[in-house]
Amino acid sequence: MKQDNQALKVALAAAQELPPKLQRQLTVRMMTAIESEANFTVVYLERLSPTKWRRLAKLMDRNNEGQLNRAEKLELKRFSAEVDRMLLANSHALVLALRPELFNEQGRPIKDRFKQALRKTPSGNGNPKNGDIRR
């Protein structure tokens, strides 16, 4: 056990020396390698970089105060479009992970299966009650 712990420490130290992009690639490869052995699913979500997030927060604050100039309003509009696109992509990734049977091999929704799934919800209106997600 002690030898395994030491090997893990050495491997982790080596991984921490890698550039961030290679760290992410290593993580993906490790998760993918064990995914078939474990009961979990890897879902890749998009998010704003910390720099973009800080800028967006600043623009939103200034917008709430009515202090944006024309260029800043345009920048905020572009951020809004980017966040909307990311939200849609992340939603798609999550529903694909939770309900893969609703999609074809290319990841496109199968309309008839979606309609059938919506009819099977407890409330009948397509919204599961009390967090009930059917798998």
Image (tube, grey):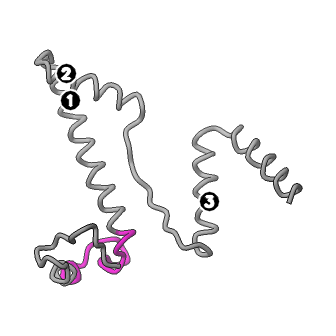
Question: What residue is shown at x 63% (from left), y 68% (from top)?
Answer: 34
* Tag shown at residue 121: none
Q: Which residue is mark 1?
A: 76
Vertical side of 117 occupied by 53: above or below: above
* Residue 135 placement (x, y as % from top left): 35, 79
Q: Which residue is mark 3?
A: 29
* Residue 115 placement (x, y as % from top left): 16, 80
Tell me where residue 93 sits by quadrant: bottom left
N-terminal-most mark, 3 or 1: 3
Kindly identify the amino acid type of the residue bearing the numbered disc 2: Glu
Kindly identify the amino acid type of the residue bearing the numbered disc 3: Arg
Span colored in magenta? 96-114
Vertical side of 71 occupied by 10: above or below: below
Q: Which residue is mark 2?
A: 72
* Residue 58 placement (x, y as % from top left): 27, 22
* Residue 11 placement (x, y as % from top left): 77, 49
Q: Are marks 2 and 1 in contact (CB under 8 Å)?
A: yes
